[in-house]
Amino acid sequence: MRIGIPKENIQEEKRVALAPAGVDSLKRAGHTIYFQNGAGEGSNFTDEEYRQAGATIVYNAEEVYRRAELIAKVTPLSDDEIDLLQENQIVFSFLHLAVGKRSSIEMLLKKNITAIGYELIEDDLGLPVLHSMSEIAGQLSIQVAERYLESYSKGGRGILLGGITGVAPAAVVILGAGVVGTTAARAALGRGAQVIVIDRDLSRLRKIDNSFNKQLTTVIANPYTISKGVKFADVLIGAILIKGEKTPHLVTEEMVKQMKKGSVIIDISIDQGGCIETSRIKTLSDPVYTIYDVIHYCVPNMPALVSKTASYGLNNASLPYIQSISDNGLSNALLNDDGLAKGVCTYNGFVSNEAISNIFNFEYRRLRIFSTN
């Protein structure tokens, strides 16, 4: 199969879809990889590394899209990238179509694109590709929180996350006990913070409570407890995920008004719309703004802060799926892996994800795949 890896061109993205090791694996299996020059620079991978791994280096995005059967990306498709897509191509990327534009989906359907969202692929343990990025975002949220709590940030409270002898640590309140919430809790506890995790799922709270030997506080989520937790927080981390759907606003603007002056909100759910009413998308170069004296950090591609680690993580998680389609063909790969099939958003000119069809009022059709053997 002919596989294309273009350079990311939105949201100051520095990650790349496949590391040289992934290209090497695909090349050894007999596939052809077209790699846009400079696509790995943001992750400190050189074109020469990709050339040695077996990629054919091309010098513009148009050529990557024109020559490839499968496009491997990182960020959601821009309008320009959708224009470059060829009829019947396969696209792997974080798509987040639930918070995208109807016109973008219409173009995918018109071109018969098979669009596979990394964030929707499942296995027996959860969401394997998203998991790797969630681990990174959870850890980074605490690093970012420490930075903006400092006195010399834009209005930070001037407190040390872990406190010192005789001085209380910061209170970190985490909405969501999934992968992001768990990794954020681990990082915050490691720095000595007081940690409170709020989730509506009692079994998840039991799991995280047991994982950390009751070093943190767990609370069942409802408007009352969320309001109390938000008011108490020095750092509020939004880590809510509803698979394939827009995230609801669990923290209202009125709740934000009650927060401490100089406290920090990090809304990791922003790539799915955000779970805090006052959140709005920002960029890596201009990541924060202040509302009601509360610092907001809402960057959808947060893992790009550690682009090399993130690119390796994405490579490790996504390569088996790219390899399966490349080796076996799209139909056979989807037939043999229900979890991969759940990542398909558009197929054969129709929306194959029910949540997206409901949001944008498209006709929904279940995947009907036939073996090509």
Image: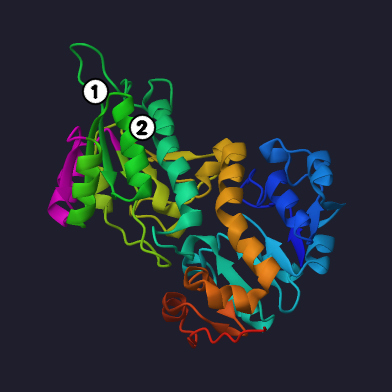
Q: Residue at x 19, y 40 (%)?
A: 231
Q: Secondary structure at mark 1?
A: loop
Q: Mark number for residue 154?
A: none
Percent across and percent down for residue 111 are 69, 80
- The residue located at (41%, 80%) in the rendering is 358
Please give left or right for residue 205 compared with residue 322 in the image.
left
Disc on the earlier residue, 1 or 2: 1
Whether residue 228 is in magenta: the answer is: yes
The 10 Å Cα crowd at callout 2, few under 14, some 14 to 19, many 20 or more, is some
**Rendering coords of residue 169 (x, y %):** 24, 23
Residue position marked by numbered label 2 in the rendering:
187
In the rendered view, does 103 fall on the left or right side of 235?
right
In percent of width and height, residue 62 lies at 82, 62
Q: Nearer the viewer, mark 1 or mark 2?
A: 2
User: Is there a contact, CB below 8 Å, between mark 1 and mark 2?
Assistant: no
Is 351 rendered above or below residue 115? Answer: below
Nearer to the camera, 18 or 264 = 18
User: Circle 2 sits in a helix, a strand or a loop, which is it?
Assistant: helix
Q: Three-letter amino acid code at disc 1?
A: Pro
The percent coordinates of residue 190 (x first, y second) are: 32, 26
Q: Which residues are magenta?
A: 213-235
Question: What amino acid is found at the position of numbered circle 2 in the picture?
Answer: Ala
Residue 341 versus residue 134: which sits nearer the camera? Answer: 341
Number of other residues with Cα within 10 Å of mark 1, as a class: few under 14, some 14 to 19, many 20 or more:
some
Residue 169: mark in rendering: 1
**Furthest residue toward left:** 224
Quadrant position of residue 166: top left
Asked whether residue 192 is drawn in magenta, I would say no
